[in-house]
Image (tube, grey):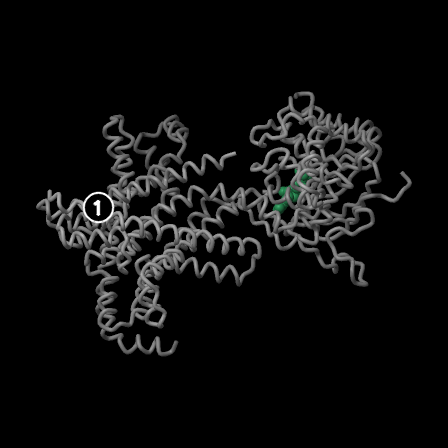
Amino acid sequence: MFSFYQTIAENWSDWWPRLSHAAWITIYVTALSFVVAFAIGLALEFMRTRSSVAIRLTAQIYILTLRGVPILVVLYLLYFALPGYGVIISALTAGVIGLGAVHGAFLAEVFRAGLRSVSPGQREAAQAVGLSPFQTFSLILFPQAIKIVLPPLLVGFISLLKDSAICALIAVPELMLAARAIMAETFLPMHVFVLVGVFYFGIAFPASLLVRALEKRLTRGSTNKSSLETGDILPVARLDGVGR
Amino acid sequence: MNYETIGPIAQALLAGVVVTVEVSIGALFIAVVWGGLLASLRFLYPSRMLDLAISTYVEIFRNIPTLTHLLIVYFGLAYFGVTLPSLAAAILALGLIGGAVMADVFRAGFQAVPIGQTEAALATGLPPLLTFRLVIFPQALRIILPPSGNYAVGLVKDTSLVAAISAPEIMFNARQIVNVSFQTGLVYGTAAMIYLALTFLLTALFYALERKAAY
Amino acid sequence: MNTAPILTVRNLKKSYGILDVLRDVSFDLHRGERLAILGPSGSGKSTCLRAINFLDPPTSGTITLEGELIGLHPNGKDHRSATRRKMTARELAPQRAEIGMVFQLFHLWPHLTARENVALQPRKVQRMSSSDANHLAEAMLKKVHLGHKLDEYPGRLSGGQQQRVAIARALAQKPKVLLFDEPTSALDPELVGEVLNVIQELADEGRSMVLVTHEIAFARRMADRVIFMDAGVIVEEGPAREVLANAKEPRLRKFLSTVSTQEAVQ
Ligand SMILES: Nc1ncnc2c1ncn2[C@@H]1O[C@H](COP(=O)(O)OP(=O)(O)O)[C@@H](O)[C@H]1O
Ligand SMILES: [Mg+2]
C-alpha cells in the first residue's frame, strides 16, 4: 500500500499538470452538455404539450430513440459518420452534442414529471385569487415544480459527468483519455485510474448526498423501518393513521 | 453503397450481438444476485458496520464512470497478475456496478412494502426470516420490476463500452468492420438499430413481467 | 369466572420519547370472557393491544398468557420487569402464534389469495401439510361466510370481506385469545354489520377476546366487561351493561354522548 502512494508521489509532477488540465476539460464538457441537455429537454417537453400530433410524435420518437441507444453509438455517428455526409465537427463538439442529445431525452421525462406533480387545482386556485399568469407561474407553479425537479435534475448531472468519460473513446482530451495515455506510457493502470476515480467520486458523491437530502425533504416518513432482528417495530410508520 | 460488403458487415454485427447478449445476461445475473443478497442482509441484520460497508461499496460503484471501472478491472487486475479475458472482465465489472445499483433498488423495494404487512406476519407468529421470505420479498419483487427494467436497459447500452477493452461485442466489431469497409454511416447506423431493437425487446419483456406480476 | 385469568396485563407503561402513551394499565381477561376497550382517539387503546403481542414492546410492565410471560425472558432473581431481557423476534414468534390479532386496516397479504393468506401460518408455523393447511383455511373462511371467495386476491374483495379473511387468518392460528383493534373503523357503514356478525358468532362460541371498538351498541350486546381508557389510564371498568347504562365518570359520559351522536348520524 505504501509503495502505491509512493509511486503516485514520484510521478506527481508529471501527472498532475496533464490530469488537472484534462479534468478541466471534463468539467467543461459536462457543464456544456448539461446546458444542451437542459435546453433539449425543455424543448421536448414543450413539444409534447402541443396540440399538433406531428410535433408530439416527433418529440416522442426522439425520446424513445435516444433513450434506446448507447451514447457511444451516438458519438460514433456524430464524429465518424457525419463527415461522410460533409459535416465535419471536432471531437469535443461531437461529445457535447452527443451527450446533450441523449441526456436531453432523459431530462424531458424529468420536466414532465415535475410539471405533472403540480395539481391543476393549484393553477385554478391561483387564478381564482386574481394572480396574473406570470404570477401564477412564478409564485405558485414554479416553486412547487422545482422542488420535485431539482433532485432528478441533479441525478441527471451526475450521470452526465460519468458519461462524459465515454468521450475518451472519440479522443476528446478529457480525463479518461489523459489517464489512458499515462497508462500506456507507464503501465501503472491501478494508480492512474484510481486517481481519476477519486476525481469523479469527489464531485459525484457530494452531489448524490445532496440529492438524498433534497429527496428526504420531499418524502418524509412512510418507509418500512421495522427491524426484524429485534422484537421491536420501531415507532416510525404507523399505518393505522394514528401516531404520526 | 457497396453491396459486396453487406455480408461481412452483417456477419460481424451479428457475432457482436451474441457477445453483447452474453455480457448483458452475465452482468445482469451477478447484479441481481449480488445486489439482492447485499440488500437482504442489510434489511435483515441492521447494523452500523454492515450499513457502512455496503454503502461504501454502493457509493464507490455508483459515483465513478463505468469506463473507469472497466479499465480498473481489466488493466488494474492484470497489474496485480490477475489476467482476466476481456469478456470475463467485462461481465465482472458491469456485474459489480450493477450489484451496487440493484442493492439500492432492492433496498427501496423492501422499504416500500407497508409496515402493516410485516406486523401482520409477525403477529401470526411467523419468525422474521419467514416473514421476509414469504411476505416482504415477494411484494418487493413486484415493486422493483420497473426500476430493474430501467437498469437492464441501461446495462445493455453500457455493454457498448466493453469495446474499450476489446471484447468483441457490437461496437467493437462495428469499429473493426468500418476500418476495412469504410461504410461508416451504414455500420454505425445499423448498430444503433440493433441496440434499439434490443432495448425495445427488453422493455417489452419487463412490461410483460409487470403485467404478469400484478395481482 | 373464578378460574385463573388467561391473560394478565400488569402495570403496562409505554412512552414514545417524552410522550407517555400508557401510564400504568392493568387488567385481566378470563377464559371465555369478552372484554371491550373503549376510549377516545389517541387514548392508547391500539398501543395497549400492540403491547400485548409485543408489536410495540412496552416500556415496562408484564403480560402473561396462561401464566407464561410474554416477550421477556423470565430468568434472573430480580423480578422487576425492567431488568428482564427482551426476546428477539424469533423467540417471540411462538408466543405471538398463540395470540390472534385483527388490525383496523386488515393488513392482508396482497400477493396471496384468501386461502393462501389463511393457510400460510398453519403451514409455516404449525407445520401442517399443505392439504391440511388448505382444509383448515377453507373451514375458517367458511366460518366467516367466505367459502365462495377462497381463491380471490384481497384486492378484489370488499373491505368487509377483507376484514373477514383477516379474522379467518387469525382463527387459523388456533389462538388462545383474539385481539381486535377497531375492526370496523375503516369500513364503509354498510359493511360494518357483516363483520360485527362474525365477531358476535365468535363471541357466542365462548372465545376469549379483547375488542377495541367505537361501536357502543355492539359492545353493550357482546361484551361481558368494558374498560374505558383515557390519556393512557383506565378510567372506568366494569360489567358492560352497568358501565354503559349509568356512566358516572364525566369523561366517559362525554365520550358516550359524542359517539352515540355519531352513531345516530350514521
Ligand atoms: N409510533 C408512535 N410514535 C409516537 N407516538 C405514537 C406512536 N404510536 C402512537 N403514538 C401516540 O400514542 C397515543 C396513543 O395512540 P393509540 O394507542 O394509537 O391510540 P388509540 O388507538 O386509542 O386511538 C397517540 O397520542 C399517538 O399519537
Ligand atoms: Mg387505535
Quarter occupied by residue C129:
top right
Residue at the outermost left position: A86
Q: Position of residue A177 (x, y in %)?
A: 23, 62
Residue at the outermost right position: C2
Relative height, residue A74 to residue C242 (above, below) = below
Q: Position of residue C160 (x, y in %)?
A: 64, 27
Q: Which residue is mark 1?
A: B10
Q: Splitting the image into four quadrants, where does ligand 2 fall?
A: top right
Nearer to us in this view, C29 or C244: C29
Residue type of the residue flagged with mark 1 = Ala
- Left or right of A230? Residue A136 is left
Task: Please report the residue visible at 54 percent of the width from the left and 56 percent of the height from the top.
Answer: B41
Quarter occupied by residue A102:
top left
Q: Is residue C42 visible?
A: no
Q: Secondary structure at mark 1?
A: helix
Task: Please report the residue visible at 35 percent of the width from the left and 72 percent of the height from the top.
Answer: B81
Nearer to us in this view, C152 or A94: C152
Relative height, residue A150 to residue A2 (above, below) = above
| Disc 1 chain ID | B
Which quadrant: the N terminus of chain B? top left
- Ligand 1 neighbours mark 1 (CB distance < 8 Å): no
Q: Position of residue C77 (x, y in %)?
A: 81, 63
